[in-house]
Amino acid sequence: MSEGQRNGGSNVSTTVLGADEIILNMGPQHPSTHGVLRVKLKLDGERVVDSECVIGYLHRGVEKIAEHRSYQQFAPYVDRMDYVAAVSNGLGYCEAVEKLLGTEAPPRAKVVRTILTELQRIASHLVWLGTHALDIGALTPVFYCFREREEILKIFEKYCGARLTTHAFRIGGLQYETYDGFEEDVKRFCEDFDKKIDEYEALLTENRIWVGRTQGVGILTAQDAIALGVTGPVLRASGVKWDIRKAMPYAAYEQYDFEIPTRPNGDTYDRYMVRMQEMRQSRRICLQAIENIPSGPIMARIGKVLKPPPGEVYHAIEAPKGELGYYIVSDSTTQPYRVRVRPPSFINLQAFDKMARGALVADVVAIIGTLDIVLGEVDR
Amino acid sequence: MNYLNSPFFHTYVLPVLYGAIIVAVLPLLAGYIVLVERKVMADMQARLGPMRVGPHGLLQPIADALKLLIKEDIIPEKADRFLFWMAPVLSVGMALLAYAAIPFGPVFQVADLNVGLLFILAISSLGIYGIVLGGWASNSHYSLLGALRSAAQLVSYETAAGLGIVSALVWAGSLSMKAIVQAQYDRGIWFIAYVPVGFFIYLVGSIAETNRAPFDLPEAESELVAGYMTEYSGFRWALYFLGEYANMVVVAAVATTLFLGGWLRPFVRYHDHFPGTSIELLDILPTLLFLGAAAYCLRLTPRQPVKIQKMVMAAVAGLCVILAGVMLAALFAPPGVMAGIHGAFWFLAKVGAYIYAFLWFRFTFPRYRFDQLMRLGWRFLIPLALINVIGAATAIVLSEQWGLHPLPAALITSAATLGVAVWLASDGAKAPTTTAETAGGGD
């Protein structure tokens, strides 16, 4: 209680506590807050009366750094935002700058980008699944998930030498040609992966405890989700069929046949189901793309020094966690005048209070897990 | 020799000796259960587990214990120092005290109390004070919530587990641990065949009582950091762990005694002998099992990467051969000694199997939420346990008054109870999961 009062100034801390209420600080050092999120909970027994997220423990001023780096120099920094899905971040940034330059990556580069980004989506969802299950108390799926994620990281490593913060793409295309055996590696992974998803689902989907812990927990209606600006699987699990890959196609997504999975209830179980389906769809995209990678150059002719014409651009992609947007203003120097990132995790996190109110402490960790936040992206 | 047969020796010296052995061996045993748990977990999770300290991590428990002994001992500033100190001691002390009435075979038992089972139940419920007081004394919200959960959980599940025990007791007709096993010998069957539902209820109840997954809410690491142990460190923390694992052995021993025939070997009424001797055919089983284990270790020996690992692996194989020899030699020893050694083997083997089931559940199931736990306990297990007791009593009436063979009688009543279980489960599924009826520690 005194802890809460000392950190006053916020709504949870300054409200008067009822006789049965306590304030519980979850985080920034807590096993289930996925990094350095701090959640202040006002509890009545174990029921959450009020909640407040405290963020900023991982703030590194990424957007400010951008103003003092050239366009190419800034590209590796974006990998450090959502470090679980670095490739997707890089794709968004590179395409945004390309749009600003009025150029496009060659077809071959676009297809390779699509394949790597979809693999990254699978890897990101695997991390989510493992940690989410771990939070709910299932100890085993996380190891299976990381086993498959390792295969993807190996492909990344073979392609560009890095596993986590890959900096796989360059503005204008790709720096590296694909390695010998790239197609076989991706194909082998994708062909095995369907069975692996069945394995995860065998452990969880119909497990009574899992269903009990997730169904009806953290319900977000479609109306609320849209009002809060929530995107990605969280939005689609509330029944809204919105996916930027279909709505405003980028990279090579137009060429491929895939579905946007949605679910009607907007609870934690539905978000789980949507992401499981998305992994299967990503696998489908990869299999289609790998069959027909066009030949040709991998880099557009953009020159060594980038001085985009003055103006501004907003470009969004469907990152694993939702809409990842880059708003870039150019003053026709080599450095951007302003870069503003719209991170999906930050905006999805705003739905937390709505979902957590009235839930139990055990649900809070399920809700944090189901939002699939990465604090590097929330705090930037 | 006269002294060894004197009442003084049997009343005072032997029990003290047995007690000393238990207190000396149990911490080591608990450490190795942890190692086995980690190895089983690793096996189920497609990895290796501890491999660094000793071959296949065989010395890991000793390294852990040493580390915990020399760690700094922290007592939070605002904690209640006396209770903070006492709580883990209480937890371990009560767990150890319960061993007094457990028969590790027909001979190795500290005291054969005529209320042995009641004594064990009473003492192990006292152990919960260690958790509740520890959680309260830490003066931390996480610990407090863990302690509250633990108290509520124990009250709910001990009722169910107790009723599960009653269903076996009506067949046994005694509370003395020895007499319960004797009853199973006389009937020539383990009581799990008579009351399978009772065994299931006790299994679930005992998992909840020992705070093991999927009922490990008091220490739910993803919600309450470490629950009631959050503020504990160093050796006090290790004491809590020791208490938890000692308790696991206690509940496994109770289940073994009541439902799995205690120290009796399988097919206990099958008495065929080796021709020309008085040695029963099935008594050779332990020897064969140990020889098999030795062969397995020997097969692994050449594959060990380092010389010292090869040596230790060979030593483990040698140990298995020695144990096989002991089991074989026991066959030629006086009947009392033979029964003691083989009884202990079968008892520990069954306890091990029961604990393995605990581990298996832990790595398979997600964790229950508090209100779901309460609903499962009060809406499903306790009604089921009550009906199961009635079923067991009915089976006895059927067999003793109406002359039906006990096994079909028990099967009929068990099937009826299972039907009730299905009905209860479907009813429980209909209950809303979104709104919890219980919140906080109280119910």
Image: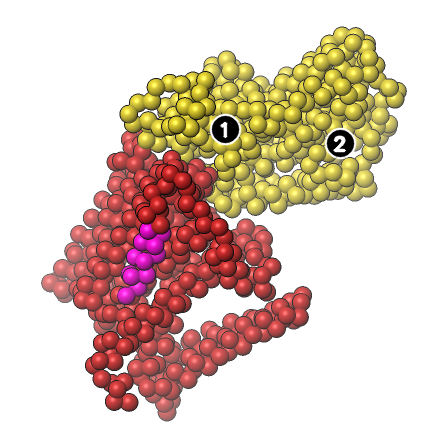
Chain colours: A yellow, B red
**Who comes first in sequence, dot 1 or dot 2?**
1
Numbered disc 1: secondary structure: strand
Q: Which residues are magenta?
A: B86-100
Image location of residue A51, percent across then percent down: 43, 23
Please report the residue visible at 38 percent of the width from the left and 25 percent of the height from the top. A42
In terms of depth relative to the viewer, which is nearer, A96 or B310? B310
Label 1: few (<14), some (14–19) or many (≥20) C-alpha neighbours in 10 Å? many
**Which mark, residue B46?**
none
Determine contact: label 1, label 2, CB under 8 Å: no
Numbered disc 2: secondary structure: loop
- Quadrant in the rendering for residue A46: top left
Does B95 lie within the magenta span? yes
Location of the N terminus of chain B by quadrant is bottom left
**Which mark, residue A168?**
2
Q: Does A361 appear above or below B171?
A: above
Chain name for mark 1: A
Q: Main secondary structure of the magenta part?
A: helix
The residue labelled by disc 1 is A38
**Extreme bottom residue here?**
B276
Image location of residue A222, percent across then percent down: 48, 17
Does A83 lie within the magenta span? no
Chain name for mark 2: A
Give the amino acid type for the residue marked by disc 2 in the picture: Ala
Location of the C terminus of chain B by quadrant is top left
